[in-house]
Amino acid sequence: MTEQQGEMRVVLIQGDIKLGDPEANHQHMQRLLERAVEQYPDAKLAVLPEMWNTGYALPQIHELADPEGQTSREWLSAFAKKHHISIVGGSIAEKRDGQIYNTMYVYNEEGTEVSRYDKLHLFRLMDEEKYLEPGALPEMFELGNGLTAGASICYDIRFPELARTLALNGARALIVPAEWPNPRLHHWRTLLTARAIENQMYVIACNRVGKGGDTEFFGHSLIIDPWGEIVAEGGEGEEIVSGVIRPSLVDEVRGRIPVFEDRRPSIYFSGKSFSLKKC
């Protein structure tokens, strides 16, 4: 199929992140993005990993975070406009109103900022709740070619209510920047596949590689279609992962198995208690 027939190439920037060095990380992500658009000139969407500007240098995060995201936002906007590509800017550590947020910014092909999302669920195993403020609202955005997407960052995928809420409000894809560590590769692949199957949507997930402190990250960035089939998957090293998606497939799958029409929310959320019958 041609692009006019509804296909869209996605590139995932599966890169390493230098702990606590925003300038080095900015330069490295610049090189990887330039490599991606050179290698895949037909790409229409690029996705970066979570917290790419600082990594999880949380004890120093107040000094390292990007104030109002200004540096990151200006760079992402300029790159998107220059290369005529939409960018989900992974997420960054951003300082705003004296607080630190794990924030995703999204830019369209004209370099216009179309979305900002603050991670809703903070991961206690990496002490996020001690240093970061949680977001307040889900977020959706348009990416062209009929692709309405919902935002999710790393730990968010363990909460199926978020992905379902986004799907019910029209999302055809879930975009997931992450720093998902060893040894939980099985969880990563299973949860992402489940979100795709149960919501009959694309899942586009970009995970980092390398080591941050004592934590190792395994990559395996994924593009999964609405049937739960893997379109593309990265390895464990630094690479550009690419795959082609077709947003209209979401409608086809939802038409074949009408899960959303067969839901019974009046029962799920009735507020009535039910008894457990013993055998």
Image (cartoon, rainbow, N blue to C red):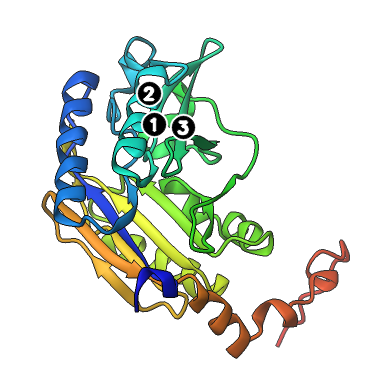
- 3D distance between C-alphas at marks 3 and 1: 15 Å
- 3D distance between C-alphas at marks 2 and 3: 15 Å
Q: Is residue 249 above or below residue 170?
A: below
User: What residue appears at the point 49 percent right and 56 percent down from the top-left corner?
Assistant: 144
Question: Regarding mark 1 in the picture, which secondary structure is present there?
Answer: helix
Rendered image quadrant of residue 225? bottom left
Q: Is residue 95 left or right of residue 8?
A: right
Q: Is residue 51 above or below residue 180?
A: above
Q: Is residue 29 above or below residue 39?
A: above
Question: Regarding mark 3 in the picture, which secondary structure is present there?
Answer: strand
Give neighbour class at mark 2: few <14, some 14-19, many 20+ (Cα, 10 Å): few
The three-letter code of the residue at mark 1 reads Ser
* Nearer to the camera, 141 or 202: 141
User: What residue appears at the point 45 percent right and 36 percent down from the top-left corner?
Assistant: 104
Rendered image quadrant of residue 22? top left
In the rendering, which numbered label is found on residue 74? 2
The three-letter code of the residue at mark 2 reads Glu
Is residue 118 in view from this perspective? no
For the residues labelled 1 and 2, say whether their Cβ atoms are less than 8 Å apart.
Answer: yes
Q: Is residue 242 left or right of residue 119?
A: left
- From the image, tell me which residue sits under label 3: 103
* Nearer to the camera, 247 or 59: 247
Give neighbour class at mark 1: few <14, some 14-19, many 20+ (Cα, 10 Å): many
The three-letter code of the residue at mark 3 reads Thr
| Position of the C terminus by quadrant | bottom right
In the rendering, which numbered label is found on residue 77? 1
Rendered image quadrant of residue 26? top left
In the displayed orientation, state which residue is furthest to the front.
4
